[in-house]
Image: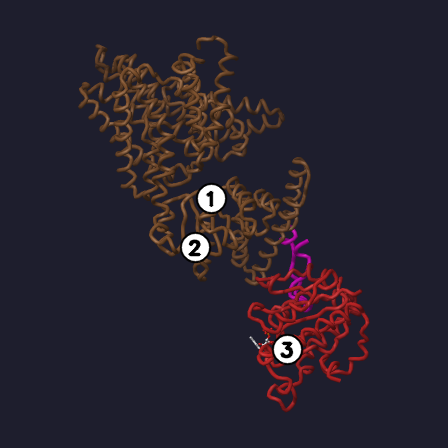
Amino acid sequence: MRNILIILAHPNLANSQINRTFIDAIEQNDKVTIHDLYLTYPDGVIDIDAEQAKLSSADVVIFQHPFYWYSAPAILKEWFDLVLQFNYAYGPKGNALKGKQWLTVITTGGSKEAYCTQGHNRFTIRELLTPFDQTAHLCEMEFLPPFVAHSARNLSKNPDKLKHLAEQYQKFIHELQDDNFDSESVSHLQTLNQRWEQ
Amino acid sequence: MEHGNLLFDAFIYLCAAVISVPIAKRLGLGSVLGYLVAGVLIGPFVLGFVGDQTNVMHFAEFGVVMMLFLVGLELKPSLLWKMRGPIVGTGGLQVLLSTAVITLIAMYLGLIWQQALAIGMVLALSSTAIVLQSLQEKGLMKTSAGQSAFAVLLFQDIAVIPMLAILPLLAVTSPELTVNADTSQAGWVKGLIVAGVIAAIIFGGKYLMNPIFGFIAKSKLREIFTASALLLVIGVALAMQAIGLSPALGTFIAGVVLAESDFRHELESNIEPFKGLLLGLFFISVGAGINFELLLADPLVVIGLTVALIIGKFLVLFLLAKSNKLAKPDAWLFSVALAQAGEFAFVLFAFASTSGVLPTGLIGLLTLVVASSMLLTPLMLIVNEKYISPRFATHKKEQRPADVIDEDNPIIVIGFGRFGQSVGRLLLANNVKATVLDHDASQIEMVRKFGFKVYFGEGESAELLHSAGADTAQAIVVAVDNVDSSLNIVHMVQKHFPHLKILARAINRLHAVELHRLGVNEIERETMASGAELGAKALVALGWQSNIAYRTSRLFKKHDDQSVLELAAFNGDEHEYISKTNEARRLLEETLKQDGTWQHDADEHAWEKPGKLK
Ligand SMILES: Cc1cc2nc3c(=O)[nH]c(=O)nc-3n(C[C@H](O)[C@H](O)[C@H](O)COP(=O)(O)O)c2cc1C
């Protein structure tokens, strides 16, 4: 059994459709923890030591957030800036995160089609997530293909589809937890979602 | 004392108190009435267990002296200074007007002006013992009414001094009325002596008492500390008596001076039981001293005079309350509370009789009137509380009875002082409807105008909370400014309204610890947040970048809150607990030191290092 830490960054969970549904679907136990950054740090003052302690005991770190301006809500950036310290997360002595897995779970307003060279967002999700990918790489973490929920507005009007996605997410957490998932098998995928579309 | 056996008498008095006071409290009558009735019962006219009360009363009056010492302890000099207006203004007017009214009535009843004036002065004074004890017991001392009443009582204490000087001049039977040069010279010297003694009390209290008490406390002998506390009070009282001032006034001054001393709480807890017992004894002796033979001989005269006295004083007080713009319930409470004659009357009548101002027969009658008015005070306070003040408090409710249930608000704020107001204003500004409870009526009338649903009364009563909608509310903010009542409220809410989320204002660290231990976890210490905030601004003023200063200040507060939680989780004996408190202080100091010497490394790796909370 592996420890899963879900770092959630949503500034208004009460009005959220997608992220809220995802979070509600997750069964928390002593191996799966949801860590809501905006709830824990309403003033944005992040406690570096507490965060590092949480990270150290996790085997898989899931960053779940809505896609804001092709990136994460502000608090997650502050979190990176403060918590991923030199000689902790990277640097000659920085191997606290080495070998852990990184999963980004995002929800986007834009459709799947919009995220390609011809689409009006001009870049693919993977391209836009390269800063996250490289951050994971510098920390010697394994960056898994992201799990993406596109077209948030439409999705919120389609409860069956939303429920289906939430279940996929929840099941995948189980797989990660039980360690019976072979990351090699998805490493060639653009997004994790493609795993179920195959 | 007829029986001449001290132990037997003590047994009787204690028995009477132990039986009647709890019953009286249980019936909601208050301890004062319990004592008074006990006194009547054991007195010479009912059961006859105890005899003449003059000596007992004289002794027991010392309870009043102790009470004023304790009141003084709670009153810092700066606070007293702020009250100077009401003390001189309201107090002075009360004494002057009441004296005038009573004098006129007495003259109308056929007394010569000298006697009428003497009676007027004496009866203008109210009973510090009864008023303060009753108001304290009901937790009303801090209300506008309580504060005003206290100001008046304090002035009366001062007014006794000139009265003692004037009374002999009113003598009708004494031939020596002319003031000779000798006296005026003595008066001048006396003035100096008085000033000297008061200065000595202030100086001694400020500079000598702390080291002396510190030395005594180090001996770790509790009874010696108690003895020295008593010695202090008795010593000051004797000094004041020696120079002809009221001992109560002297100990009050000593109390005020010591209000800022480190030993304030120890003094308080040492004197408190003595004060309680002596005051109880005093009330019993008043009850026992009521001369029922005289009453039965001339019931109409006694009752008539008592009623006239109370109504006369009440009207004067009510006039003053109105001109001071006290809110209606406050005005009633203030006027009802002070409408009796007081213990000074016993002393002053005795003095007036020896100075040849008043004849003994008249004094007997008047003493009975005084005692009756004192006996009636607790009853009148109950009537006021039960029937008069609710009329003002439920004013709104009566107008729109249907609204009460529909509008039940999700949150209740108890205590609407500076702290509660900040909470309430934030809620209201965001359209969150709050029900507010406070025991200060004038505060209430003001905030009602702004759309708060306000209830008058003590938040400690489950009954009141029930009518304030506690059954349907979701959360309650306990923002009272008193540790004991805060804890009482929390207990009561947990017992009667377990569904309510409790959020509490903590007065200090220990209070926060106690709240945590009761399971209340949403706590803000009242000065911590704003202190830390201003601290951050101070750092900015010294050139820090504001976000770093803010972050530092937040982390500092977080650490401090954490240390309170740890303290609360610690279950040890008191000794360990205290060393734990010291431990917390030491820890805090260390953090401060670290924070102070921490140098921000301007490296490229992160804009701030970890370890600030360690
Ligand atoms: C400030 C802000 C910026 C956003 N930027 C993007 C964006 O760059 N690309 C995108 O596809 N959607 C963007 N959105 C839409 C959100 O991603 C979308 O509303 C969210 O994923 C819905 O999830 P929720 O129901 O959990 O809130 C943005 C929304 C906000 C409020």
Quick check: is the Cβ at mark 2 less than 8 Å away from ligand 1? no
What's the residue type where badge 3 is placed? Asp
Whether residues under marks 2 and 3 lie with C-beta atoms below 8 angstroms apart, the answer is: no
Q: Position of residue B44 (x, y in %)?
A: 40, 13
Q: In what element is the residue under mark 3?
A: helix
What color does chain A have in the rendering?
red
View extreme (bottom): residue: A118
Depicted B421 relative to depicted B571: above or below:
below
The reply to whether the residue tagged 1 has its Cβ within 8 angstroms of ligand 1 is no
Mark before the other along the chain sequence, 1 or 2: 2
- State the residue position of label 1: B463
* B602 and B566: which is toward the camera: B566
Local packing at callout 3 (Cα closer than 10 Å; few below 14, some 14-19, many 20+) is: few
Please name the residue that numbered disc 2 is placed on.
Answer: B405
Q: Quadrant of the N terminus of chain A?
A: bottom right
Question: How many angstroms separate mark 1 from mark 3 (CA)?
Answer: 50 Å
Chain bearing tag 1 is B
Residue range of the region highlighted in magenta in the rendering: B593-614
> Can residue B597 be found in the magenta stretch?
yes
**Residue B417 appears in the figure:** no
Residue behind mark 3: A160
